[in-house]
Image: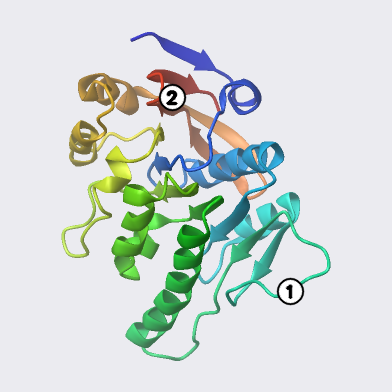
Amino acid sequence: MQIAHLDREEFLTRKLDIQPGEHLGIWEPTGGGKTHLAYQMLGETMRRQPQLRFVSAMPKSRSPATRMWAARLNLKIIDRWPPPASLSRPAGYVFWPKHLKDAPVAENREQLAARFRRMLHDQYQSGDSVTLADDIYLMAVILGLNMECEEFWTAGAEGGASLWAPNQKPSGTAGGGSVSSFSYNSPTHLLFGKDTDERNQRRFSEIGGGIDPKLVASIVPNLKIHRIQTPYGIKNISEKLNIHKGGPFMAIIGP
């Protein structure tokens, strides 16, 4: 299979083609730029398909990057679901439930899970939606919402309910578990940052869709790292391997 090389702008404006109901998976160790790219893709998809309901699900207690992108993309930050009635409809939402302070960890996670479960159910049932779960390990494993995510991956496509799922560690953890394997074989669109962990690379066999896992495993560890100035200082940003299973089509995306 021929591997194209695209700069970031060309990828976003000319090659990005995520249709309603198509899922997206992004795998990369922390700090490599996956959240930035996910929001760039979200912004472009919002511009092309404004009829969809866009929700960024934020399970972390703090995320400066999320606040920056919410302002940039006109995403209204809310902590209750459903969204409150408003005379002017925002371009989308950041659903960001408040964490309980000075509460036991289990109690805080339980109340967060209940709030995210309601939002996910609504996004799935209503359809014509895009849900960006940043990151999916926190949602699916730590908050115990793997089954709710599986609804999207196994039955969301027909109703146009897309789930976008950035993940730091595809192989999961020894004690905590892992995100459902449907997160690998259900997405039409997959992106990988540089990753030299062989345990993570073994999961490439689950991609399917006519994609050669050995080819993917030969590319991902050798993606280049670039020192990039960001609003949060200089970061080591990886090139990304993009796989579109509809072609299939593969390309290396620049920083």
Gap in angstroms between the C-alphas marked 2 and 1: 46 Å
Find disc 2 in the rendering and name its residue.
224
Mark 1 Cα shell of 10 Å, populated few (<14), some (14-19), many (≥20): few
207, above or below 3, in the image:
below
Q: Secondary structure at mark 2?
A: loop
Where residue 18 appears, x then y in whole percent?
A: 53, 34
Q: Quadrant of the N terminus?
A: top left
Snapshot quadrant of residue 228: top right
4, above or below 19, in the image:
above
Residue under the point 47% across and 61% down: 125
Where residue 25 appears, x then y in whole percent?
A: 40, 42
Snapshot quadrant of residue 150: bottom left
Seen from this angle, which residue lies furthest top? 2
Amino acid type indicated by mark 2: Lys
Q: Nearer the viewer, residue 147 or 250?
A: 147
Where residue 6 appears, x then y in whole percent?
A: 55, 17
- Label 2 with label 1: CB-CB less than 8 Å: no
Q: Nearer the viewer, residue 157 or 180?
A: 157
Where residue 215 appears, x then y in whole percent?
A: 26, 19
Residue under the point 71% across and 39% down: 47
Find disc 1 in the rendering and name its residue.
85
Q: How many numbered marks have been drawn onto this rendered protein structure? A: 2
252, above or below 33, in the image:
above
| Residue 109: mark in rendering | none
Amino acid type indicated by mark 1: Ala
Question: From this viewpoint, is residue 59 visible?
Answer: no
Residue under the point 77% across and 61% down: 89
